Amino acid sequence: MDRRTFIGSVAGGFLCPAVLAQQTGRVWRIGMLETTSAALNAVNLGAFRQVLKELGYIEGQNLHIEYRSADGRGERFTGFATELVGLQVDFIVTRGTPAVLAAKNATQKLPIVMVSIAEPLAVVATLARPGGNITGLSNQTSDFEAKRIELLRELVPGIARVAFLYNMSNPFYPPRWRELEVVSKSLGIHPQLLDARKPADLERVFDEAGKGRAEGLMVAADALFQANRKLLAELAAKHKLPAIYQSKEFVEAGGLMAYGPSYADLYRRAASYVDKIFKGANPADLPIQQPSKFELIINANAAKALGIKFPPSLLLRADEVIQ
């Protein structure tokens, strides 16, 4: 960098991260505690990296990312969180309740940014002023589950029995299930709980759905299900069970339909939190934000295999139709 550029940067009142790195030799180290592999998370990880790059953080120059994936096995988060702290990263980025809890237990000093969590009040004091070392984004809104039930009912008119696939070892889901039972019944739906905690449980719970005469399926965004999304799509097709998922990733793996927040958008917004904290912001003062971009994704091929035809009303509202 020449003298004129340096003087201009100082005169502007700040040094951008790329300029700062050149002057100090500082390399920022981010630890990512994730639910799935970098390959399965490629789109979201790409969005995160792109925003960081635009903000001046260049991998191989002033940025290094340590990526750790539990691959759907929640018990691995604790060990990985401890490992990241031991590597002396500057920052931890997490996704999902078990990952956030593991990071919180591993450190009360390092900043933690949640890309998404269903119930942020499980780990922070308030949404407006989180306190402590954790901030980030929620992936839920108050009417989220009711909206997904309505979409499933629009696809399958007259549907009365819906199975809900949850991992009840995730501390978020037991209270959410109790809420969902009330919401479902208020909408005229009889809910059936399918509790899967490990990959070996998945085929069993689909058999349970058949015995319970389920006419539709709603799948939670748990780490176990994200890591096994292709298998879930195959099992739903095998059992002729129309299913709605929480993210586009499941539909790209062969699932029928998804409605939920754009995770790529959440990752982009998480990158801006990283930048703010690197520049001196205190996580305790950065409010927890809700998702602002939702997407409806449908899979025409999966519908055809099930003998289902998407109504025009859904096709018109879809953000993307996978053929």
Image (tube, rainbow, N blue to C red):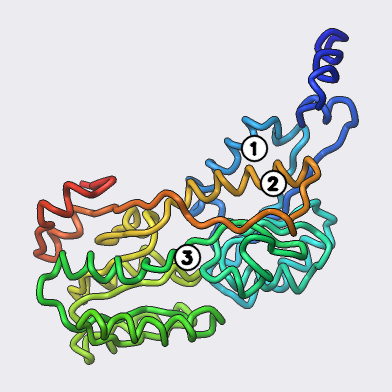
User: In the image as oriented, which residue stretches furthest toward the right?
Assistant: 24
Which disc is residue 52 wearing? 1
Going 62% across and 75% down the picture, which residue do you hit? Answer: 122
Q: Gap between marks 1 and 2, in whole Å?
A: 8 Å
Q: Three-letter amino acid code at disc 2?
A: Val
Residue 284 lies left or right of residue 159; in this view the side is right
- The disc label shown at residue 274, or none: 2
Residue 132: % across, % down: 77, 65
Q: Which residue is mark 3?
A: 227
Q: Give the left or right position of residue 309, taking residue 178 as reference.
A: left
Q: Is residue 264 above or below residue 149?
A: above
- Where residue 217 sits: x, y (%)? 27, 75
Tag 1 near tag 2, CB within 8 Å: yes
User: Vertical placement of 288 versus 72: above or below?
Assistant: above
Name which residue lies at 36% across and 63% down: 230
Q: Residues within 10 Å of mark 1 (few under 14, many from 20)?
A: many
Residue 141 percent across, percent down from the top left: 43, 64
What SS does tag 3 mark?
A: helix
Give the SS element for disc 1. Answer: helix
* Amino acid type, residue under disc 3 in the picture: Ala
Q: Nearer the viewer, residue 271 or 229?
A: 271
Where is the N terminus found, in terms of image quarters? Answer: top right
243 shown above or below 60:
below
x then y, percent, for residue 168:
48, 84
Q: Alpha carbon of mark 1 to alpha carbon of mark 3: how far?
A: 26 Å
Horizontal relation, residue 267 to residue 27: left or right: left
Up the image or down, 179 lies above or below 305; here it is: below
Please state which amino acid type lies under the numbered disc 1.
Answer: Leu
Between 35 and 245, the one lying in front of the other is 245
Crowding at dot 2, Cα within 10 Å, few <14 / some 14-19 / many 20+, comes out as: many
Q: Please tell me the numbered disc located at residue 216.
A: none
